[in-house]
Amino acid sequence: MKTVFVTLVILVFAATSWVSAQVLRGNPKEGQVVYEKNCLRCHGNKLDGNGPDSRDLIVRPANLQSPLIRAKTDWELLVTISNGVLFSPMHGFRGKLTDQHMLDVLSYIRSVSPADIVS
């Protein structure tokens, strides 16, 4: 029983540290390049959801500057970037972008629109 508990603790810490390390390695300058190529047409220059293609969409792109989006965890945003949003024009980028590119985009988004800090 003790061995199972120790194994579970190690797995939890290993997974948590891996996710944290992944999030911290994004390069915002590289992310800006990837964003401009893949995201800007919908989310816009200001990340406000007002890109040139946004007016043609039934479901509006997310305003990445909004408090709702800024309050999301990095993990939640990575899942959205990777898998997309069901019943919306936000498609997933897994297979189109590398994991590093997705981390870079997240880092760029956070550099322009940092997460809200709840006190």
Image (cartoon, grey):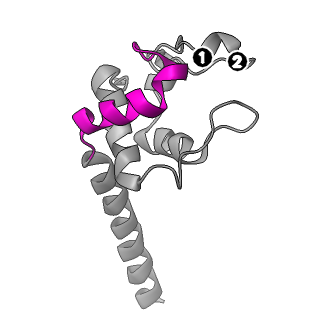
Dominant secondary structure of the residues highlighted in magenta in the image: helix
Q: Is residue 11 above or below residue 19?
A: below
Residue that appears at 45% across and 45% down: 75
97 up-or-down from 115: above or below: below
Reply yes or no: does residue 58 show up in magenta: no
Q: Is residue 31 shown in magenta?
A: yes
Question: On the image, numbered disc 2 is attached to which residue?
Answer: 57
Q: CA distance from mark 1 to mark 2?
A: 7 Å
- Where is residue 16, by image quadrant? bottom left
- Quadrant for the C terminus in the image: top left
**Tag 2: amino acid:** Leu
Q: Is residue 107 left or right of residue 67?
A: left
Give residue 62's mark: none
Q: Residues within 10 Å of mark 1 (few under 14, many from 20)?
A: some
Which residues are drawn in magenta? 26-47
Residue 91 in the figure: left or right of residue 98: right
Question: In the figure, 32 relative to 27: above or below?
Answer: above
Q: 10 or 63: nearer the eye? A: 63
Q: Which residue is mark 1?
A: 53
Please state the horizontal and vertical placement of residue 58, each as a whole percent of the image.
75, 17
Residue 18 screen position, x and y as percent? 33, 62
Label 2: state its secondary structure: loop
Residue beneath the point at 68% across and 30% down: 89
Q: Position of residue 8 (x, y in %)?
A: 44, 76
Most foreground residue, 95 or 113: 95
Q: Where residue 26 appears, x then y in whole percent?
A: 27, 44
Asked whether the residues under the numbered discs 1 and 2 touch, taking CB atoms below 8 Å apart as contact, a structural biologist would say: yes
Kind of residue indicated by mark 1: Asp
Name the residue located 43 percent from the left edge and 24 percent from the top edge: 70
Question: Which residue is rendered at x = 40% and y = 12% of the image?
Answer: 46
Q: Is residue 93 above or below residue 41?
A: below
Mark 2 nearby-residue class (10 Å; few <14, some 14–19, many ≥20): few
